[in-house]
Amino acid sequence: MALKITVIGTGYLGATHAAAMAELGFEVLGLDVVPEKIAMLQRGEVPMYEPGLEELLRRHVSGIEGSSGRLRFTTDYAEVAAFGDVHFVCVNTPQRHGEYACDMSYVDAAIASLAPHLHGPALVVGKSTVPVGSADRLAAYLAEHAPAGGDAELAWNPEFLREGFAVQDTLHPDRIVVGVRSERAEKLLREVYATPVTEGAPFVVTDFPTAELVKTSANSFLATKISFINAMAEVCEAAGGDVAKLAEAIGYDDRIGKKFLRAGIGFGGGCLPKDIRAFMARAGELGADQALTFLREIDSINMRQRGQMVELARQALGGGSFLGKRVAVLGATFKPDSDDVRDSPALNVAGQIHLQGAQVTVYDPKGMGNARRLFPTLGYADSALEAVRGADVVLHLTEWREFRELDPAELGGATASRVILDGRNALDGEVWRRAGWTYRAMGRPGA
Ligand code: UDX
């Protein structure tokens, strides 16, 4: 009989995982503690912007015309426990308020709510990004609190999806990593992921700590790559080099690779910044803090980029105060193809300039609602053209395709002055210059 799957937590990770599991042919029950979220998902609506997710969901949510009916949602842990053979825990693990460490309260609450209902054999699979050692602790908790005892087993299966590509990354992962303690757990997870594995995804079986560490070390490596190229951008600024050419040239070396070498205002979002901080905090608890001191530098290089963008803007406005200046900001989300503004470098830069007295107007294709909620005092416009009206300088801070397709001549007709600063090294400077603009990109003083 086919496995039945439940997914606990229906954020980016959980909603996508639930829909993907239904797409792979399983019966799926998703759970969230927020009833409004469940009501939306049951109507086939996604609470965030993620390309392709709504279509996938609507293909499977029961009650939607023409759907497979394999996907349902609930708020009831007893129902989840009774329904599933494999329970994926996909709740978030934010940074603890005022600290570097990871807030495990949602994971702990999910396991604590599920455990007392597990009366028969079940595999509980953690997908959230957690401090190494969590799986050991949670396995002991399950064994003690589930009526099924040892038959309610734990496994750890980190998720590597990127926002904006969540559906694609979940259905066609680069690799599947499973931390297991028994052959039974491995067998069940091989059954769940049979399709991606047949399609060529490597299946890496390991112990709990390694599985947990794979995720945090992968994110640390990605953060390191970005801060490395941003450090080179700083040197290029000082030496008169061109960081985009430099990245291209070093990227031809296969051992380095071209990806994640785009210099600019740095990384943000709900993962990389908090994950490297939580990793440092955990290493400290384990007495291995020296091993990760370099991550402190990665973090500070990253945060410095935002300040450098502010300084570039100040220079572009004559080098003095921002008071009375009009600044247009294109982009609010932490990356394109997402409506996520968590720890967004773009909004951070906009906020700093606003605090220094400028009149800032922001436009983003999908992030306006979230940006308005988080930064209610900034100005907002409904289009790029409206945002730049009367601007003394335009800042390009999130590399949406829409911004690459803008007509510089049309925008130039609306601004007070034709100066654009590219904080993502993603626009074609030549096109802007031909339309009479001063184009300046981070890490490319002469380009
Ligand atoms: C990341 C990891 O990529 C993913 O594997 C993990 O599961 C979750 O965290 P995500 O946060 O969605 O995914 O975004 P990602 O595409 O990694 O980008 C992170 C940030 O780095 C963005 O702010 C992006 O603008 C920035 N970035 C990325 C750069 O500044 N330069 C680059 O070259 C690449």
Image (spheres, rainbow, N blue to C red):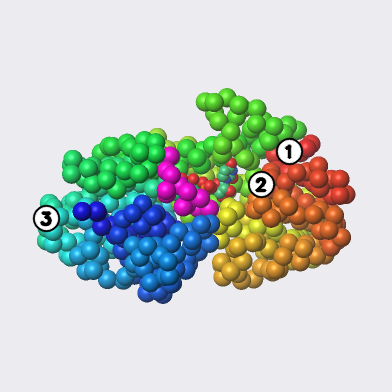
Q: Which mark is residue 149?
A: 3
Residue at the image point whose x is 58% and y is 69% from the top: 369
Looking at the image, is mark 2 or mark 1 earlier in the sequence?
2
Badge 3 vs badge 2, beta-carbon distance below 8 Å: no
Q: Magenta segment range?
A: 163-175
Q: Is residue 169 magenta?
A: yes
Residue 37 in view: no
Residue at the image point whose x is 11% and y is 55% from the top: 149
Mark 1 falls on what kind of element?
A: loop
Mark 2 falls on what kind of element?
A: loop
Q: CA distance from mark 2 to mark 1?
A: 11 Å
Q: Nearer the viewer, residue 154 or 165?
A: 165
Residue type at mark 2: give it. Answer: Arg
- Crowd band around label 1 with a 10 angstrom C-alpha radius: few (<14), some (14–19), many (20+): many
Q: Nearer the viewer, residue 341 or 204?
A: 204
Is the CB of mark 2 within 8 Å of ligand 1?
yes
Residue type at mark 1: give it. Answer: Arg
Q: Is residue 226 left or right of residue 5?
A: right
